[in-house]
Image (spheres, rainbow, N blue to C red):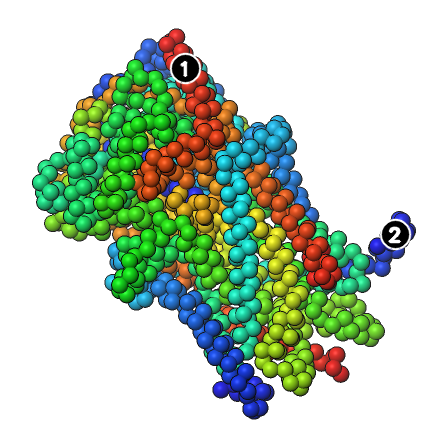
Amino acid sequence: MKKNGWKGFCKKLYKYRVFLLMLAPAVIYTLIFSYYPMTGIVMAFKKYSYAGGIWGSPWNGFDNFKFFFKSGQAGLVTRNTVLYNLAFIAINTTMQIAVAVLLTEIRNKHYRKITQSLMFLPYFISWVIVGVMAFNIFSSDYGFLNRLIETFGGTPIKFYTTPKAWPFILVFFNVWKGIGYGSVMYLAAIMGIDTSIYEAARIDGANVFQRIFKVTIPMIMPTTIILLLLSVGGIFKGNFDMFYNLVGSNGLLYNYTDVIDTLTFRALISSNDFGMSAAVGLYQSVLCFITVVIVNKLVGLYDKDYTLF
Amino acid sequence: MGSSSHTSKIKRGKDAVALDIIAYGFCGIIALVCLVPFIMIVSGSFSSESAIIQNGFSLLPQDFSLEAYKTVFKDPMVVFRAYGTTIGLTIVGTVLGLLLQTMTAYVLSRKEFEWRNQFSFFFYFTTLFSGGLVPYYVLMTQTLNLRDSYLALLLPLLFSVYNLLIMKSYIVGLPDSLIEAAKIDGCGEFRILFRIVMPLIKPALATVGLFIALAYWNDWYNAMLYIKDTNKYPLQYFLYQQVNDIEAYKKLLANNAAGSAVSAISLPTQSLKMALTIVVTGPIVLAYPLVQKYFVQGITIGAVKG
Amino acid sequence: MKKSTKKLVSVLLASAMAAGMLAGCGSGNGKGSTGDSKSSSAASGTSGDNLSADTSEHVDLTMYLIGDRTPDFDEVYAKINEILEEKLNCSLNVEFLSWGEHDTKYSLLFSSQEDFDLIFTASSWCHYEQTVSLGGFAPLSEDFIKTYAPDIWEVVPEMAWEQAKIDGQIYMVPSYANEFGQEVLAVRGDLMEKYGMDDITSWDDLMKFYKACAADGIYASQGGPWYPFFQSQGYSTTGGAPKGGELILYHTQDPKDLEFQYIGEWDAFREYCQEMKDLVDAGAWSSDVLNSSDERQTGLLTGRTASMSWNLGTCLTYGKQANEEHPDWNVTMVDPNKNLSKKVNSYINNGVAINANSKNKERAMMVLNEFYTNPDVYDLAMLGIEGKHWEAVGDDQYKVIDESGYGVASNCNWGWNNCTIQREEYLENRTALDDKYESIKDAFNNNIKEDHVYDGFNFDSSNVSTQFAAVEAAIDNYYNPLINGLVDDVDASIDAMNAAMDSAGIQDILDEMNRQAAEYVAEKEEK
């Protein structure tokens, strides 16, 4: 990072001219489609009106942030959002890696291909349908699960009035829906491992489990860490579609299921206040940013190559 | 059964057998858990609306009915045109997007490029902060004037930082010596990218390509915002509109005192939603094996060995 | 993504509003709010065709409606345009925002300064208040309306203009149709007979029926009858108050009572919630109601519930369907608040507004005048082309020939609903239920309640927007479970709700409301 001033900079510009040329399309694209609209963030500090637009509307300081904290739910939903995301990240990552590793160990080509394809199906099922399906499973009147419990002589569980059950249900559906899509990334990483390394491990007398834990897992670390960092970057953002379609308007469950995005939706659906929704968005973004910078630093301490930036 | 596997001739130890049991069992169970709901959706799409409302989901169609599909395909030409639009967009978008993302990822993964972290940050930052819908909408419709243009469907999904960083992580995994050797041979950067790097990261290209394709395939939101011309509707938006229409129509007719509404009440909505899932999923499931062939076997980096 | 889910909400609200649309004014344009026209000042010399405005320059106008273009839509509007060209030297182009997307796109039209003139709007479900507060609509002064739409000024009742006012200013032309907000029930006749009841006319009857159902092992309904309850107490929702007006009620049956009632501090609410909890425990409805994906009519139609509570028209429609599929059910309709005078629904549940950016506001208003009061344009816009889509039966009825071509009510043409010239649908095969419907409707029309000054009051929350959003955010933890009797401990839950509301600032909202209401009342008394 030593700098020789302007001249050195120009020198590097010349040296990297091919790289810069290759980057140019993406940089221009990002400037136009991401950075230019990003100016909308100022709406978080403005009393937006149509006539004034984004720039002409009057400033109102931090007023737009107040409602969120005044609702008395800010702490709860922020905590829920983070805890759910942590659970999703941990369980998704473990499950997806397990699936990817085990799939590659299946030697029957057809079995491997079919099971892998089937795992992709939930990705195509919209959360709306998942919500209906969940009701078909958990309803106390005619829910599949409760009928099953009854058949075995148990007492039905009223899932929709039992908040504590929901973290498990939500995590289950989240894992279920993403397992096919997510494991593909790890599968590709495993496929990128040079087969000669396995050869070497086999000659060294490693058993299959050692091979997995000593070769496969370490070799897919770069991908795993990038994916983890990307997930951490969204740790204060809730998956609105999932929570909304599975929990809906059932306030009984909110202490365990309400996330920032669902709360904001309910708060602003009638007023459609642009400034307030921008404010909550900014609150989430800033927290995500701080988190990711810290985590990225920590990763950098471990291995510089694994960092995001 | 593993006919092509080169390890099959070697006597397999207990550890391998144990792993087999775990692998076959684990993957089998998960696949089953993923399959059963989908079968229910297929059945639901072939069931009558009233049967679904009455009995909920089931493994076999109840009161077999093609009503939902008839509703979807009531004007087949429109559906096929929408398919055409979506397929065209998906192909063009995937090719261009893959090119753009691979090229960018390649540069960001080159250790000799000192500014790579700054540029990575430049891209990554945009995933954290966004200005919301209003300025983006104004950009698309006023500044770029893309209303009712196919570009309005193509551009928003062309470049994704997530895909970029995933791609970068794959390229970083390649041995440096490979590229060094190529440079000594006098290859330019473009040549290294296309001739040496790309063939080695086929699984990664397949994966990221799949993600880009899925994004285009599933997109209805951009069409909702920017496309008015019904001839330019992509498939998902066309279907999305149909469900909305029927739901709204049902509600409206239900509320008009007149008896004429009765016929409309049996219009499918639940079964239609499920039929739409099938109509949308079908082609992708059929095309999936094309991608899958890259997940069959690991690569051998010949250049390093030789 | 949010947008797709909001869709359902908006469609539901749309249905609440479309209710009884074609039922028109009804027979007796009784007293009070249905008052047939403006009194003195309105007839200020302008008569129908002779407008003072300058129409020498040809203009093209654009109007946005909610819905989708039906196959023959353009054909119908070509005919309307012929009339507009000739009379007003202008043409009208109609664009649509479909049901699923208007939540997203409505505000984008204004944010991106799109060029259009007229747009459908409605209180709460179709963005009226929020667009006004963001400055999207052109204010319509009395003079402006009288000058460019004199016939509308004649027809629309004063109460409707009152309701359309926000902070003293009118921003929409409200539609004129007398719908009733009070809910009635479509009930299984066979079960009523079984339980020895021949009618349900009061809250006590209703509770008796609910308990009988629960004891019989059939669900009575798909949730707690909260609306019938507070209506039975003489209360009504307050326009512009949180939670769609449900959180703060006023005593609409007693014009002298000017107090707003926050439900958390209302003893009747506490008793109601307790009663609901007992009903749920007895099995009067499923404990899963909050998550059920069932539509509101599903229970009745599938036989899972013994009744359905909705507005008149909808109860008729689904009652009929249920009877067709299960003649032995003998579904009938009852009014659980028979002794109560009826409140006419707010007129601003549909209307049309003018874009603040419109370059031709005057002409737009004149076009609206035609849509609203010219019977030729009105019939075209409502029903389509005579002889192709509908045919006249007598002077004031119609019969549908081709429903799919134009669609009588799928294009939110009810924005300019005018029951003085609205045709009613002619029914060929009348059933007992139709008669029952007619008799209840007549009873409603003959028993319209006295005006309460707050019937025309609309709370403007912009001064307390922070508290308002905070209340909306926090209330859902308690509200739905409470009104459906799903909490374990009613008292504890209401206390918790009150504590949450206090810290969210409900008192500030009430104070602001009382201040605005006092101002409003004072202003009314001055007149």
Report the Cα–Cα distance between label 1 and label 2: 71 Å
Write the residue at 26% across / 52% down: B266
Chain under numbered label 1? C
Give C484 or A115, whichever is nearer the viewer: C484
> What element does badge 2 sit on?
loop
Q: Is residue B247 above or below residue B40?
A: above
Residue A3: which numbered mark, if any?
A: 2
Location of residue C474 in the rendering, given as x and y in whole percent from the top left corner: 45, 36
Chain under numbered label 2? A
The amino acid on which the numbered mark 1 sits, given as a three-letter code, is Ala
Tell me the residue that label 1 is attached to. C518
Q: Quadrant of the C terminus of chain C?
A: top left
Quick check: C473 left or right of A133?
right
Location of residue B169 in the rendering, given as x and y in whole percent from the top left corner: 67, 64
Give A276 or A300, whichever is nearer the viewer: A300
Location of residue A240 in the rendering, given as x and y in whole percent from the top left corner: 49, 48
Write the residue at 33% across / 10% down: C40
Q: Outermost residue toward the top?
A: C526
